[in-house]
């Protein structure tokens, strides 16, 4: 199943709302300022057609914002996207 279509259906059913914790593969700043692809735990808000804004606060108290594409989301509230779709009986072809 396609994660993007599952996430869109979860948003449509109002299972994913503002403030939902997700794990997603994001581009972050690495050592020396080079972009690195990492899996981060972010809080979602401001949903769009193909992406949402993700927010994270680091240990130093600095807030970071990321553009989270729906296809990059791996876990929602600790559960994989495919398992969450199975729990809510979502069938995407």
Image: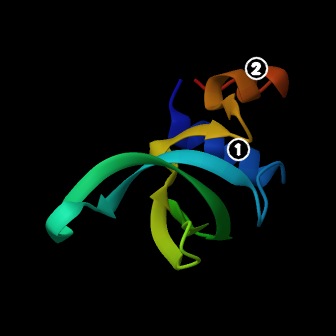
The location of residue 76, given as percent across then percent down, is 69, 41
Q: Residue at x 20, y 62 (%)?
A: 31
Work out whether residue 69 or residue 1 is closer to the camera in this orientation and state it: 69
In the displayed structure, does residue 69 sit left or right of residue 12?
Answer: left
Instruction: From this view, report whether residue 65 is shown above or below residue 12.
Output: below
Question: Which comes before the other along the chain, label 1 or label 2?
Answer: 1
The location of residue 8, given as percent across then percent down, is 64, 49
Which residue is label 1 attached to?
9
Which quadrant, please, contains the C terminus? top right
Work out whether residue 10 or residue 38 is closer to the camera in this orientation and state it: 38
| Extreme residue toward the front, this view | 60
Work out whether residue 36 or residue 60 is closer to the camera in this orientation and state it: 60
- Report whether residue 34 is seen: no
| Extreme residue toward the bottom, this view | 62
Work out whether residue 69 or residue 57 is closer to the camera in this orientation and state it: 57
Which residue is label 2 attached to?
86
């Amino acid at each position: 199943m396609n994660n993007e279509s599952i996430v869109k259906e979860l948003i449509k059913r109002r299972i994913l709302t503002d403030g939902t914790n997700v794990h997603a593969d994001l581009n972050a700043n690495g050592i020396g300022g080079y972009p690195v692809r990492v899996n981060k735990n972010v809080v979602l808000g401001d949903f769009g057609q193909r992406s949402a804004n993700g927010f994270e606060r680091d240990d130093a108290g600095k807030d970071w914002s990321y553009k989270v594409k729906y296809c990059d989301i791996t876990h929602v509230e600790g559960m994989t996207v495919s398992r969450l779709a199975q729990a809510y009986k979502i069938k995407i072809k």
